[in-house]
Image: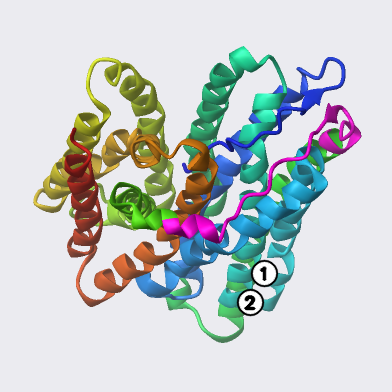
Amino acid sequence: MIATPGNDTIPSASRPRGNVGYLQWFVFGLFFIFGGITSLNDVLVPKLKELFELNYFQAMLIQTAFFAAYFIVSLPAAALVQKVGYMRGAVVGLVIMMAGCLLFIPAAGSGLFAAFLGALFVLASGVTLVQVVANPLISMLGEPRTAPSRLTFAQAFNSLGTTIFPWVGATFILGSLATVSASDLSGPALTAYRAVESAVITNAYIGIAVALAVVAGVVWLNRNRLIEGRAPTIGFLSAFNLLRRPRFAFGALGIFVYVGAEVAVASLMTNYLMQADTLALPAQGAGERLALYWGGALIGRFFGAWVMRFIAPWKVLASVALGAVLLIALSVFTTGALSGYALLAVGLVNAVMFPTIFTLASADLGKRAAEGSGIICMAIVGGAIIPPLTGFVADISTLRIALVIPVVCYLVIALYARFCRP
């Protein structure tokens, strides 16, 4: 899923106190967990849609509640980390994530969709803070010369989380949708059904909260094992004048539409694969196929990194963006297995888009690279805006027609790649 760019302002005075290499594995665990939690939203969309009898626009507000946190919380999170340090900042982020998971308990008790959205926003706020910390922290926990390899390894854990969590989530959360529908119930029976099914969701997030508590405890016990220098103050508000640079501004737009398209396709995938004219799968089976979408991104990341050793990044970006357009078109204009698996294959071409757009947009920023990174992180809010727009189109037409929104997004990315041609 989305892993925010690294922080280029790691204070040079920051260094470990003694041997803390073992903490790297807990940071790798952070990448795994926040990647998985983000992709688990794709399972929640069909679950809560059915449970509360929502239309697609309303169901996509799940992604809005989650990704809005990137826009709202990123700058305060950076300021907090600057004040309390990376290790303590990581603990604060983990505790907030735990609180978000535990808020699913009163949300389930209330029987209100809005309560679930509130829990997701709190959870995503913690995820945002942890992501602000994670990249620079993994750089500090080891030799500087091996930092790039550790970051690459950590990104692999992120992709592993996005691949595994939807499959596990589909098994535990979507399994019962094949036998009962909220639309067939009313009165006390509907209330009881929602209570039971909400408990299924709650149990999954309680399990995540327990895992977060273990990681938070380890990090807290080692909070003084890192000697942290004071990071330089970044003028985040003044950073917005970077948007006067066409290449950077277009790149920020590219991140906005990329995240929006990726999340929109993933959010609709389960319902799309359940249709009679695609794979006609039950909810659980369709949800489990999400692992192929995110697994494709995992494989594509390694393949793309190899390809870009020989081909210019702008050419690779243009190729994968147009590849996404062709795959969606193939899915829309065919039926059966070809239609379903063509859409799943979009994950493969998504793999290198985020890092490539980021690299192209950040070229020549020099000392202002960290400011640019902050703006690009805020552009992830595309995941909060484009999915509901796609859901609205699905409500007034069909799921197939709604895919025109991601197509437009990928065409914007292709145009950006063309813009970056030397």
Q: Quadrant of the C terminus?
A: top left
**Farthest-out residue, left:** 333
Q: Taking 313 as reference, is 40 above or below it?
A: below
Q: Taking 406 as reference, is 363 above or below it?
A: above
Q: Which mark is residue 111?
A: 2
Residue 267 horizontal side relative to residue 220, left or right: left
Q: Position of residue 322 (x, y in %)?
A: 16, 41
Asked whether the residues under the numbered discs 1 and 2 touch, taking CB atoms below 8 Å apart as contact, a structural biologist would say: yes
Q: Residues within 10 Å of mark 2 (few under 14, many from 20)?
A: some
Residue 217 horizontal side relative to residue 267, left or right: right
Q: Position of residue 174 (x, y in %)?
A: 49, 54
Q: Taking 54 as reference, is 168 above or below it?
A: above
Residue 289 horizontal side relative to residue 371, left or right: left
Circle 1 residue = 108
Q: Helix or strand or loop: what does disc 1 sit on?
A: helix
Q: Inspect the image, locate mark 2, and give the three-letter code of the amino acid beneath it.
A: Gly
Q: Position of residue 162 (x, y in %)?
A: 49, 39
Q: Quadrant of residue 138?
A: top right
Q: Position of residue 397 (x, y in %)?
A: 19, 73
- Residue occupying the point 69% across, 43% down: 232
Q: Is residue 239 magenta?
A: yes
- Residue occupying the point 40% across, 66% down: 385
Q: Helix or strand or loop: what does disc 2 sit on?
A: loop
Residue 178 appearing in the image: no
- Residue occupying the point 18% across, 47% down: 415
The magenta stretch spans which residues?
219-241
- Residue occupying the point 53% across, 66% down: 65
Q: Taking 353 as reference, is 40 above or below it?
A: below
Q: Quadrant of residue 361?
A: top left
- The colour scheme used to paint the residues is rainbow
Which one is nearer the viewer's eye here, 178 or 64? Answer: 64
**How far is mark 1 from mark 2, CA to CA?**
5 Å
